[in-house]
Amino acid sequence: MSRPVRKKAARKTPAERSAEIADAARDVALEQGLYAVTLRSVAARIDVAPALVAHYEPNMDVLIARTFGTVVATELAEVEALVTPLATPRERLAHLLDTLLDGTRDDVTVIWVEAWAMGRRNEALAQRVRDEMDDWHAFLEGIIAAGIDEGQFETDDAASVAWQLLGMIDGLNAHALVRWEHAGDRGTRIGHAVEGMLGLHRGVLAAPTE
Amino acid sequence: MSRPVRKKAARKTPAERSAEIADAARDVALEQGLYAVTLRSVAARIDVAPALVAHYEPNMDVLIARTFGTVVATELAEVEALVTPLATPRERLAHLLDTLLDGTRDDVTVIWVEAWAMGRRNEALAQRVRDEMDDWHAFLEGIIAAGIDEGQFETDDAASVAWQLLGMIDGLNAHALVRWEHAGDRGTRIGHAVEGMLGLHRGVLAAPTE
DNA sequence: TCTACTATTGATCAGACGATCAATAAGTTG
DNA sequence: CAACTTATTGATCGTCTGATCAATAGTAGA
């Protein structure tokens, strides 16, 4: 006689349960992508009835949008913490590129790519995507502007360079999702493009800092 | 008394029907994306029973992969026809960038973006994506190699520049899918980055050809 | 004309999805 | 201890998905 695998879940405070659901959604998204974030998958992960998730999240589109937001905002915070301490804008930029293109963040890349596609059918998500892109853009622009101030970079439009850079990073990472062979060395030779955008002499960006 | 809307479809030769299904799948993909290419949506578009589509396409993953392939290969052929007649590699490259970043090809961009995401669950599609990326890469590399031969471009690694360029184009276009404000002027200022990659003087690429 | 082939169909299956709702039970307040 | 609130549940609905299969009906060839 096999009995039901799950007993009734312990009653928790709304705050606790809500956080638990958010965490589960985040984990599912990182492991299997945004399309896998469903009522049932989230419920199963915390061993709870699907209806409970629906009770806390009356609209799945919103949960998906929020999950995207937390994943991406977390990544930005991590990269910021990693790069900001560095001494010069040039170092910060070089280290940022190395970090974002080292091929260890495919889980987040999938979420970005799926978000661009899903955003056309999920306006809450689209809004969130725009917001997070704005945050990333502001971060990059800050580095570039600092470089201009210190006379390291030369460009008349830091904002424009920033979104070009973002596009480049996101595109190269997206390419890697299908394991395209050429995507392997992403990051090793992106330097010249960036040097071109910032009026640097060839090789300056990749050169070791002394 | 409402009668069934559809009579039995006229019997066609396998070749005809097969082509009809392929066309319908392509139209659905261009209008609503790859995720909308389903047995039922394709069948409905040509006013035929879903089972008939299944009869011709025993596996939807394969139909989706093939649909992606035709859409993307067609686009490549169009761009090639547009650009190849131009006199110099510099002109070809400039015109290619203008064309691909003019914001009129979102339908194809969606297909690319969805394909990168779907490719992780659909190996047939992933293989096709890699193949089409190879074709695009070869095309770009050809232009760049020609530029090197003619002394217009300066780089030691045309292949590497080619995939960086691809990444840039795809990333910037993907950003536009969620109608990010900054994505509006994609293409107007991509020049400096390319100039950096190709050792050109600033502004040379965007300058009018005389 | 008779036969063989097969294009096309409706019916149906099992599996997902989001969502809703009445019933239960755990906890809180009086 | 009783009354109330509400976290949690199972059951269920309607809709979508890919897939299978026996039955029907055009068509081509002998």
Image: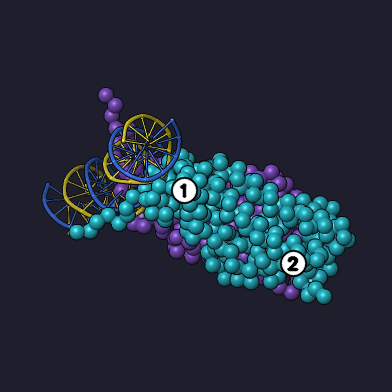
Chain colours: A cyan, B purple, C blue, D yellow
- Which amino acid type is shown beneath numbered disc 1? Arg
Write the residue at 49% across / 57% down: A27
Q: Are marks 2 and 1 in contact (CB under 8 Å)?
A: no
Quarter of the image with the N terminus of chain B is: top left
Seen as rendered, the residue at the extreme right is A151
A118 over B165 or under it: above or below: above
Using a 10 Å C-alpha cutoff, classify the residue at mark 2 as few (fewer than 14 neighbours), some (14 to 19) or many (20 or more): many
On the image, the x and y values in percent for residue B208 come to 82, 53
Q: Which residue is mark 1?
A: A17
In the image shown, does B209 or B114 lie closer to the viewer? B114
**Which amino acid is tagged 2?**
Ala
Please state which of the two labelled residues, at mark 2 or mark 1, is closer to the viewer.
Answer: 1
Q: Nearer the viewer, residue D24 or A96?
A: A96
Q: Position of residue A144 (x, y in %)?
A: 79, 57
Label 2: which residue? A94
Residue A165 makes an appearance in the image:
yes
Quadrant in which residue A53 is drawn: top left
At 56% from the left and 45% from the top, the residue drawn is A125
Compared across the picture, whether A180 is left or right of B1 comes to: right
x, y percentage for residue B95? 72, 54
Q: Please tell me whether mark 1 sits on a helix, a strand or a loop.
A: helix
Q: Secondary structure at mark 2?
A: helix
